Image (cartoon, rainbow, N blue to C red):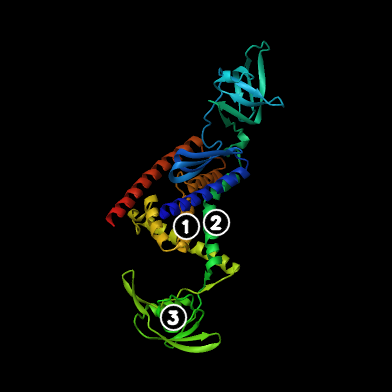
Amino acid sequence: MNTVIAFVLIFGALVFFHELGHLMLAKRAGILCREFAIGFGPKILSFKRNETVYTIRLLPIGGFVRMAGEDPEMIEVKPGYHVGLLEGKDGKVEKIITNNKEKYPQARIIEVEKADLEHGMYITGYEEGSEEGLKRFEVSEQSFFITDGQEVQIAPYSRQFASKTLGQRAAAIFAGPFMNFLLAFVILLFLGLFQGAPVDLPKLGELTKDGTAMSSGLKEGDTIESINGKSVSSWRDVVEIIRANPEKELNFQVNRKGEDLSVKVVPEKFSAGGQTIGRIGAYTPVEKGFVSAVKYGASETYNVTKEIILGLGKLITGQFSIKMLSGPVGIYDATDKVAQSGIENLFRWAAMLSINLGIVNLLPLPALDGGRLLFFLVEAVRGKPIDRQKEGMVHFIGFALLMLLMLVVTWNDIQRLFLQ
């Protein structure tokens, strides 16, 4: 149950902050955001705040922000339609009733002659019970359709995604992956604040009670000057010597609060990755402080990003098999193992997953944020956007292929679980 909770919280946080990036920049640009969703499929929970419906959906495989203009509008008003109009105090139409008009006796019923609800924001038509002939009704920028008793906000062209500048559209799309990198940095920053930021100094960090370092007389904070007469200048130097000498006596020359001491330590034998190495039960030294934590968060975010990109490069060149990729099932299994090793490692795992999500979404593939940005780049080069229907078809095919890949990866994850 703890693993389920950890997985749901981590997955939910990664998707939430990713989509929040899209939502914030889209709203800042003035785009009407109809829905902010975590997950896909049937709705489990939903509520509306201001213009946006916030939903949690059944399938935990991502999320989305539905912006006006990205998909064809579901409701149209065509010539010959009969609709009801409810006007506001300023005389402009605020609600257009498409069916069940008898439930709104105060509405003015008209037969539509022409409607422009994107640019001109008006409807012309003939009102029932009136002999005045063709009338023109101005429609408010903040107006709604009412269909089956449900209100759907009308999106003038100025509120649609396509109406915004190339820079505004690119920023709204890029903000999602950026928030994943920012989330990872913040997680690692807080780990650095509460635990201390690891530093590469020849100084002993926390000692384990059952390690040979403590039983030999070494203490946390001792500065190591040399081992077996070989000077050391970093924690990496210390670790390399210890790992290379299992069950061999080592002479540590240390400085403890200004006093030089000589301590003999025998690293215990330990198996790791098929190799036999030595260890003494001492953790990496840490440095506490806000500046150190910021440096740690930035450097770790950079290092993890670099490693993931190198891994993707190996996948492209064939050095890394697709069978080694993990989907939701594999990530759940890994989360279970990481959760058992402690809350600190679980937070580091969450930061790594957040960076991974950001990088994957920036890949220049259809249906991903990177694919959208690639289309924007083409638009910038050619000076005009690509046909929306053609772009939509490319993204649809890309999404279908991604779902197929997800199924293959999930099947591989399930096979690995049964073979363990």
Q: Which residue is mark 3?
A: 214
Q: Nearer the viewer, mark 1 or mark 3?
A: 3
Helix, strand or loop at label 3? It is: helix
Instruction: Determine crowd level at label 2: few under 14, some 14-19, many 20+ residues with C-alpha closer than 10 A.
Output: many
Residue 263 image label: none
Asked whether, in this view, residue 305 is left or right of residue 139, the answer is left
Q: Which mark is residue 182?
A: 2
The residue carrying mark 1 is: 350
Q: Which class describes the residues within 10 Å of circle 1: few (<14), some (14-19), or many (20+)?
A: many
- Residue 200 rendering spot, x and y as whole percentages: 50, 74
Q: Secondary structure at mark 2?
A: helix
Q: Are marks 2 and 3 in contact (CB under 8 Å)?
A: no
Which quadrant, please, contains the C terminus? bottom left
Side (left or right) of 204 relative to 51 = left
Residue name at image x 32 percent, y 50 percent: 414
Which residue is located at x 35 percent, y 76 percent? 277
**From mark 2 to mark 3, how far is it between C-alphas?**
39 Å
The amino acid pointed to by label 1 is Ala
